[in-house]
Amino acid sequence: MHRSILPLAVLPLLAGCGSLERAAGVAAGFASHQLCSATFVSKVEPEAFYREAIAPTVAPLDFLLSHKVDRERGEVTAGFAGLAQRRAVYRGAEGCLVLHGALPTQAPPAAVGAAESPSVVSTDPALAAALDRVFTETDRAPHRHTKAVVVMHEGRIVAERYAPGYGVDTPIIGWSATKSVTNALIGILVHQGKVSLSGPAPVAAWADPKDPRHAITIDNLLRMNSGLDIGQSMSAGVSDAFDPSSHMVFGERDMAAFAERARLRAAPGTEWTYTNGNTLILSRIVRDAAGGDAASVLAFARRELFDRLGMRHVTLEVDATGTPVGSSHMLASARDWARFGQLYLDDGIAGGARLLPEGWVDYSATFTPGSEQYGYAAGFWTNRSDSGGALYRTKAGIPADAFMARGAFGQYVIVIPSKRLVVTRFGMAFTPRDDMDAVARLIADVIAALPPSGANHVPPHRGRGT
């Protein structure tokens, strides 16, 4: 859950300083990348996206940020205060990429997703009212900008709604919900016997047993307790644009290599710090196990995960080295995100076949000590702890067995096994806690409206589609 914010007060203090130029590059890289993805992957109106998603993120310095969308060339250029300019290019199946040096070899064109059935409109007044509430905009800033909600019960879509300009086939960025997809790709590799949760993580830079990072495991990386000093990706505050985690995603050509060079600040397993670097190292592990380049890792993800779940409108973006930006940059339709959640509701089984190891879902939802304030598990956020997860049980409340993929600005894929329910909510929320209270109310309303398991009283639509 990461935001890049440059407060006005720091500019006079850091004028002429290299750290300011680097932070300016982060702001320009963020704007160019996100606007490129919105324009060419999501295919939404770029200026509306800029106003709703980018300008509030860099406020109060948004007046220092400029941008230009070149539809003919498939690129976006952004500049910040004359200190930095960045160019992001659309690369088809590989999504958008901020250029740092030469453009990599030409990427394959994006596949055209199969047609979806029309949006499911619930005839249940209670469900309709629940969607009305979560789509109702605030009178003044900060706004919630809800763009898509899908409710899937017993494996069937029972209600959904989309904002103007968005639809059943619009890919929407998941931000840190992408970390949960990386969890799935690692789980598939574990199930195939290609990697292991225990033992040293297969990172060449740490191969020497004398290197203290040699002790880091894949489990540590999933649980955010590797001990690596790579900044933090949790809060929005004064130093965010200066944080190594921000620079890694928006300022580095090889993101995983940047993370792998980090020193240890704590022994593995002893300190919890939420940072994108852990997941980018996992993404490199996935890439290497799948064949070592962008084409092979994207083919692996599609063959072993997306296609098997019926996910039709997915773009997993990669960096210049072909490593997926598995910390934050997968775009998929709200239906596809719900189909992903259904895999975890069904204990890692899809189409009668086991994709994830037996017990993987419970492992992924098991609370990680040290994250008591937030309730983190292993690539998911969880309510499954007496001491953690309280953030998600506020007011209306989300059931205690729930766990979720969650990303910045209000991206949610909430899995509730006891109710056989998956709810996705996507948008650009700048309300407190990424609109968590409104999402908690949505969950409570949906649970109250739905019939007992096995009895659908609204026109159903199968989650995978036909």
Image: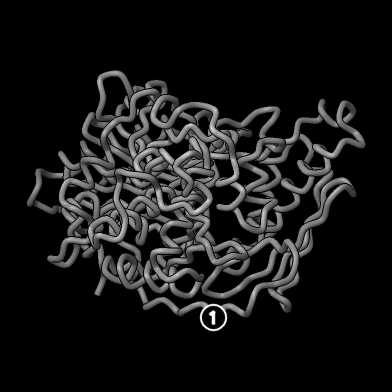
In the displayed orientation, state which residue is furthest to the top.
Answer: 387
Q: What's under tag 1, amino acid-wise?
A: Pro
Placement of 123 over or under 224, stated as above or below: below
The spot of residue 54 in percent (x, y) is 67, 48
Residue drawn at x 23%, y 46% is 361
Residue drawn at x 21%, y 49% is 345
Residue drawn at x 34%, y 22% is 390
Residue drawn at x 90%, y 34% is 15
Asked if residue 434 can be seen in this view, the reply is no
The spot of residue 424 in percent (x, y) is 36, 49
* Figure coloring: one colour
- Left or right of residue 320, residue 84 in this image: right
Placement of 431 over or under 22, stated as above or below: above
Q: Label 1, on which residue? A: 108
- Left or right of residue 90, residue 133 in this image: left
Q: Nearer the viewer, residue 76 or 188?
A: 188
Quarter where residue 334 is shown: bottom left
Quadrant position of the C terminus in the picture: bottom left
- Left or right of residue 201, residue 330 in this image: right
Placement of 239 over or under 135, stated as above or below: above
Q: How many marks?
A: 1
In the displayed orientation, state which residue is furthest to the left.
Answer: 454
- Left or right of residue 234, residue 286 in this image: left
